[in-house]
Image (cartoon, rainbow, N blue to C red):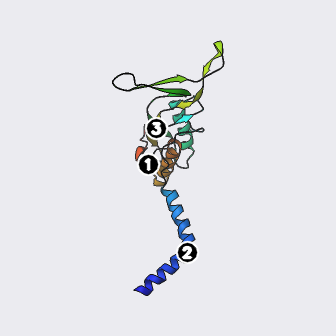
């Protein structure tokens, strides 16, 4: 038993750099990526530099993309979102503490950072907050094919960031 343990220890010492590299790779794979906080490209589900958000336009663009999938046929898309839009502005925070009374009282004063002077003063905008996608329903003529259904699911997930449990793909019925 001692011989086997020495043999294993010897092999571990020889390959310690390989093992270290494998451990680092596993750590990077398991590292949580979190939600998209800053998104310069899509503008959905986080802060972005673009102030335009149209759910209807996004649905139309997604329908057009999905219809180009081989075998998908006619497609209708419904996206649901949670939250609302808003601006993220730069602020200065000033924390003050009043210890003159029986209890210490802390107050925080926030003021917007302005740029320009006089009548041309504007707040400094850091970005915009858009609603996050909460679900998607896709109705497609070709959804009876598992391959087409999977392709649609992957495409919707790539655009919205939704997991497959929040995307429903249904075969379109005859009118």
Marks 1 & 3, CB-CB < 8 Å contact: no
Marks 1 & 2, CB-CB < 8 Å contact: no
Residue furthest left as drawn? 102
Kindly identify which residue carries mark 2: 15
**Separation of residues labelled 1 and 2 (CA atoms):** 40 Å
Q: Nearer the viewer, residue 155 or 53?
A: 53
Which comes sooner in the sequence, label 1 or label 2?
A: 2
User: Which callout, 1 or 2, points to the residue nearer the camera?
Assistant: 2
Q: Is residue 163 left or right of residue 61?
A: left
Kindly identify which residue carries mark 1: 164
Q: Nearer the viewer, residue 128 or 100?
A: 100
- Badge 2 local density, few (<14 within 10 Å), some, or many (20+)? few
Quadrant of the frame with the N terminus = bottom left
Place of residue 99 in the rendered image (x, y in percent of width and height, measured from the top left): 40, 25
Place of residue 5 in the rendered image (x, y in percent of width and height, measured from the top left): 44, 82
> In which quadrant of the rendered view does residue 62 lie?
top right
Residue 126: numbered disc: none
Residue at the location (40% across, 47% down)?
A: 165
Q: Is residue 166 left or right of residue 91?
A: left
Kindly identify which residue carries mark 3: 133
Disc 1 secondary structure class: helix
Residue furthest top as drawn? 119
């Amino acid at each position: 038993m001692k011989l086997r343990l020495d043999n294993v220890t010897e092999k571990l010492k020889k390959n310690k750099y390989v093992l270290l590299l494998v451990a680092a790779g596993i750590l990077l794979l398991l590292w949580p990526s979190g939600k998209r906080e800053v998104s310069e490209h899509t503008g959905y589900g986080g802060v972005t530099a673009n102030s335009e958000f149209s759910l209807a336009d996004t649905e139309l663009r997604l329908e057009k993309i999905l219809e180009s999938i081989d075998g998908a046929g006619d497609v209708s898309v419904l996206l649901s979102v949670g939250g609302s839009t808003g601006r993220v502005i730069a602020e200065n925070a000033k924390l003050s503490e009043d210890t003159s009374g029986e209890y210490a009282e802390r107050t925080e004063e926030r003021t917007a950072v302005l740029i320009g002077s006089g009548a041309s003063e504007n707040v400094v905008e850091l970005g915009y907050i858009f609603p996050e996608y909460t679900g998607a329903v896709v109705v497609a003529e070709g959804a009876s094919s598992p391959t087409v259904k999977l392709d649609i699911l992957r495409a919707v997930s790539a655009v919205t960031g939704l997991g497959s449990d929040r995307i429903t793909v249904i075969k379109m019925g005859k009118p």
